[in-house]
Image: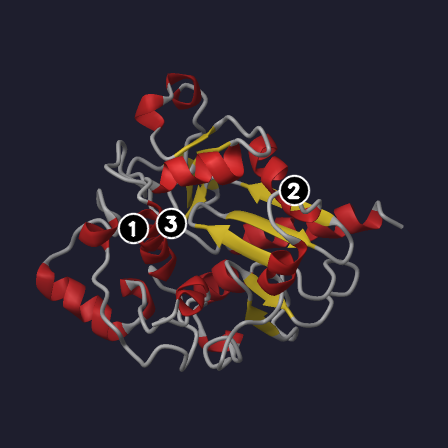
Amino acid sequence: MALRQMLTHSSGMAYVFMHPLLTRYQQLQGERPLIQQTVKESYHPFLLFEPGKRWLYSPSLDWAGVAVERVTSMKLGEYMKRHIVDVVSANDITFHLDQREDLRARKAKNWQRVGQSLEEEKNPVMPNPVAEGQGGGGLYATVNEMLKIYHGVLTEKLLRPETIKIMFQPQLENNVGLDKPDEYPVFVRNAIWNAVPSDVSVSFGLGGLVNIAAVPERRGVNSLTWSGIPNCYWWIDIEHGVAGIYLSQLVPMGDQKSVQLLTEFEKFVYSTLN
């Protein structure tokens, strides 16, 4: 298994909700929260297929974070602080909310739809506190701090030009898994493709989905995008020098109305460029 396959969700692993065999295994083991205190406790590194054979959403980025820690002899959060956070002066970012009272006091609540209204979600996705940072999620941040990181990518402050070029290019050896979006349940399709129309061909770059054709009136070709469970979405468009972020704190993931609003937001952003 190559690190590139881990960064592109083509490692052979999968989240339990993405494959019936893992769902059944989880049922036999007993129901429990998806995310535990550590990567090792959270995710069994079972291989469902040979690495590189297809794309399937997985905890491989979490294990990539473990690889970073072993190679650098640093905690993932420490490495990210030194090489990302401090470089762009994005101070309001942490894996450990219990260590940042100032951020904890400002933390947004999560909400869920109940009929035509919203109710506060009482069961957080991420445990708090956590024993270690996890590469696939669990970072607490503000909109402004995230935009500093995206700006750091667009201006080549964070990465070398050759690295950025590779990040935003299709990296999959086989596009199976991303070639038929309608095979997924709507909420899963929305979480993966978010505002990219189903008729626009996609692949995966290093760390995010890339559309290999331009989206009319919106993002340019080979823009990078991904999402978070509480309907949090972002994209970086190298062609037009644009980045955007949409945070709703609404569960479950892949909410149709959220994606529709994200689409309108993106259209508005690009309309201001003309």
In the rendered view, tell whether residue 146 sits above or below residue 201. Answer: above
Q: Which mark is residue 70?
A: 1
Nearer the observer, disc 2 or disc 3? 2
- In the displayed structure image, the side of residue 105 where residue 70 appears, left or right: left
Q: Which residue is mark 3?
A: 135
Q: Earlier in the sequence, mark 2 or mark 3?
A: 3
Q: Amino acid at mark 3?
A: Gly
Q: Which residue is mark 2?
A: 157
Task: Say which of 255 and 194 sits in front.
Answer: 194
- In the displayed structure image, the side of residue 78 where residue 148 appears, left or right: right
Q: Which mark is residue 164?
A: none
Q: Quadrant of residue 126?
A: top left
Q: Earlier in the sequence, mark 2 or mark 1?
A: 1
What's the distance in space between the residues labelled 2 and 3, CA to CA?
21 Å
Q: Amino acid at mark 1?
A: Arg
Q: Position of residue 86 (x, y in %)?
A: 53, 31
Task: Say which of 116 and 56 sits in front.
Answer: 56
Q: Residue furthest left?
A: 29
* Location of the N terminus (image quadrant): bottom left
Task: Say which of 221 and 266 sits in front.
Answer: 221
Q: Earlier in the sequence, mark 3 or mark 1?
A: 1
What's the distance in space between the residues labelled 2 and 1, CA to CA?
26 Å
Give the crowd class for mark 3: few <14, some 14-19, many >=20 residues within 10 Å.
Answer: many
Q: Position of residue 168 (x, y in %)?
A: 62, 62
- In the displayed structure image, the side of residue 221 where residue 133 appears, left or right: left
Q: Secondary structure at mark 3?
A: loop
In the rendered view, tell whether residue 70 sits above or below residue 182. Answer: above
Residue at 26% x, 38% y is 127
Q: Position of residue 220 (x, y in %)?
A: 74, 62
Q: Secondary structure at mark 1?
A: helix
Q: Position of residue 8 (x, y in %)?
A: 46, 66
